[in-house]
Amino acid sequence: MFINFLLVFIGGGIGSVLRFGTNTFINNYAFNQLGTLTVNVLGSFLFGFLVAIGEDKSSYFNIFLLTGLLGGFTTFSQFSYDVISLQSNGNYYQMAYVLLSVLLSISMAILGLYTANRFINS
C-alpha cells in the first residue's frame, strides 16, 4: 500500500511541475487562460490514450501515470473520462453530472473568494 502512495506522490509532483511549466510558457506568449485550456485538453487526451494502452499494464502503471502524473497535471482529464464512462455504462445522467460538477465547482470557488474577502481580507 505504501508503494501506491509513493507512486501518486512522485507522479503528482512531476505532473504539477509540468502543469506549472506549461502554463507559464504558454501564458507568456498568449492570454492567461490559454495555458489552462491547453493543460486540460492535453491532459484529457493523454488520459484517454493511456487508459487505452494501459489496460494490460500493471496497477502501478495506472497509479503512477493516471492518478499521480495526470492528476497533478490536470484533474479535468479524470472528469472527462468519468463522463465518458457514465455514457458507456448506459448511464445517461451524465449531463446532470457535468452540469452539477461545473456549476457547483464554480459556485464554490466564488463562495470561497467571497468568504475570504468578507471575513479575512476585510
Image (tube, rainbow, N blue to C red):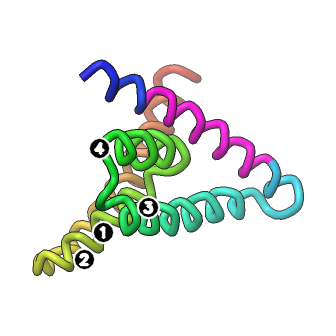
Q: Is 113 within the magenta?
A: no
Q: Which residue is mark 2?
A: 95
Q: What is the three-letter code of the residue carrying label 3?
A: Leu
Pointer 4 with pointer 1, Cβ within 8 A: no
Query: Most extreme residue toward the right, as rendered?
Result: 29
State the quadrant of the C terminus: top right
Q: What is the three-letter code of the residue carrying label 1?
A: Val
Q: Earlier in the sequence, mark 1 or mark 3?
A: 3
How far is the residue under mark 1 from the one under mark 2? 5 Å
Depth check, mark 2 against mark 4: the one in front is 4
Identify which residue is drawn at 23% across, 66% down. Answer: 97
The span shown in magenta is: 8-24
How far is the residue under mark 2 from the one under mark 3? 25 Å
Q: Which residue is mark 3?
A: 50
Q: Is 16 within the magenta?
A: yes
Q: Earlier in the sequence, mark 2 or mark 4?
A: 4
Pointer 1 with pointer 3, Cβ within 8 A: no
Residue 98: give its label: 1
